[in-house]
Amino acid sequence: MSFRTNLRLISRAAWIAAFVCYAGLAILIHFLIPLNTHPGDIGTWPLAGQRAFNYLLPLFFLIIVPFYGYIYADAKRRGMRYVMWTLLAIFVPDLIGIILYFILRDPLPAECAKCHTIVLARFAFCPNCGAVTRPVCPQCGKTLDQAWSNCGYCGTKVPAVHTGMNRV
């Protein structure tokens, strides 16, 4: 998928929340800076440094909040527990929750070639019509990757003809 398509997954509410967080924090910092006048405090910094701090620190929220919106929409689209993953991304510190989501997320669902139902990637058969959506090992019955020539579980040679599926 293209970057532009992925950006469209982020809801308007997430973008609005990001801009509200940015503006609110920038205004809050703007009014708090003059109150700090002790030596070494931000109020004693040069004006350019104060303004950079004022507008660049809140920029973090302008970047991170849409990530949470993307995780919510992407996990929902993949049939995952989207609320749980969004909360993990928010509350696990140091952006580790976001990194974990991108490492552990499920593959995108596929469309059944026979009945055009959206089927989660972990299913080998369409729950609507029963058609094969992913190749299955004739020996052990476990799902196979399209590129495998031998079963990764039992070592059986896989027939050359695989039942293909169309990616959504």
Image (cartoon, rainbow, N blue to C red):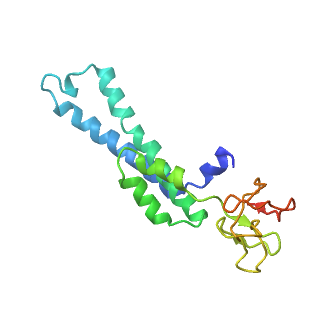
Please provide percent x and percent y for residue 166: 79, 61
Query: 22 or 133, which is in the foreground?
Result: 133
Left or right: 19 with respect to 116?
A: left
Outermost residue, bottom side: 129
Q: Residue at x 55, y 61 (%)?
A: 75
Outermost residue, right side: 161
Which image quadrant for residue 11? bottom right
Left or right: 61 with respect to 81?
A: left
Q: In the rendered view, would you say 74 is above or below 127?
A: above
Please provide percent x and percent y for residue 131: 79, 75
Please provide percent x and percent y for residue 29: 28, 37
Outermost residue, front side: 155
Query: 125 or 61, which is in the foreground?
Result: 125
Please provide percent x and percent y for residue 158: 80, 61
Query: 166 or 131, which is in the foreground?
Result: 131
Q: In the rendered view, would you say 67 is above or below 56?
A: below
Q: In the rendered view, would you say 50 is above or below 74?
A: above
Q: Quadrant of the C terminus?
A: bottom right
Which image quadrant for residue 73? bottom right
Q: Residue at x 33, y 21 (%)?
A: 48
